[in-house]
Amino acid sequence: MKKVLTLMMAFCLLLAGSVQAENTSDENVQAESEQAESELEKSDTLVVYFSCTGTTRGVAERLADVTGADLYEIIPAVPYTEEDLNYNDRSTRATTEQDHPDTRPEIGGEDVDLTGYTTVYLGYPIWWGQQPRILCTFVESHDFTGMTVIPFCTSGSSGIGTSGEDLAEKAGTGTWLDGTRHSGDISEEELKAWVDGLKKNQIITTCESVGCSS
Ligand SMILES: Cc1cc2nc3c(=O)[nH]c(=O)nc-3n(C[C@H](O)[C@H](O)[C@H](O)COP(=O)(O)O)c2cc1C
């Protein structure tokens, strides 16, 4: 009797083990298919942006819509308060950071994996004629090799200045196109025309460098 009971217990243990193994393999298959699905859904274009008062965010979101791009927001580890952004007082945070070019505000939130992207739009507000220093933190911590990077900005009225060139130099990788200032209320149609123009220019530049016949 004791022998029979031992045999039955061993059988139950074996059965439980095989059910568990089956569940684990089901979970693995599901995880793999989810990963494959998200890779399939992943665009080859990414819009990265930093925005404190929403203007650049609006442009970035419309740009992502018209290009079918993924969207990534650079979120500061320490958010900027209204007082931090008060440029009428030169001692406040944003202005002090701009006064010290080596400042590198920390990025909070999730990092973005740039693998698989071929085009990266990079949007930011102009602060005292330049890119906010957190953009330097971002470009210095990512590798843009094999990617075309297109800077754009919003501002009260200033142009993009040399911020795009400065970021390209700090990144040290990637092919950087000239940057552009967009008005905060630029429409999707206007953004589409801008993107189409960039593509056309790229084809012309490529043709000039490799000698296309037509
Ligand atoms: C600290 C600071 C400095 C700024 N400097 C400039 C400037 O030099 N030229 C300009 O036209 N606008 C300047 N602005 C205005 C912003 O560029 C403009 O409001 C921008 O669209 C804000 O973008 P956001 O809403 O995405 O943060 C400055 C704003 C701040 C907070």
Image (cartoon, rainbow, N blue to C red):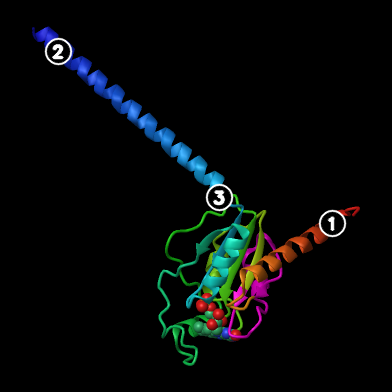
Residue position for label 3: 42
| Residue shown at the point (51%, 40%) measured from the top left | 36
Q: Is residue 166 magenta?
A: yes
Mark 1 to mark 3: distance in Å? 29 Å
* Residue type indicated by callout 1: Cys
Horizontally, residue 173 falls left or right of residue 207, namely: left
**Mark 3 residue's CB less than 8 Å from ligand 1:** no
Residue position for label 2: 6
Q: Secondary structure at mark 3?
A: loop
Horizontally, residue 110 falls left or right of residue 101, namely: left
Mark 3 to mark 2: distance in Å? 54 Å
Query: Which stretch appears magenta?
Result: 153-181
Q: Secondary structure at mark 1?
A: helix
* Residue type indicated by callout 2: Thr
If the picture is divided into quarters, which one holds ligand 1? bottom right
Question: Mark 1 vs mark 2: which is more N-terminal?
Answer: 2
Residue 157: mark in rendering: none
Q: Secondary structure at mark 2?
A: helix
Residue 52 x/y as whole percent: 48, 76
Q: Quadrant of residue 65?
A: bottom right
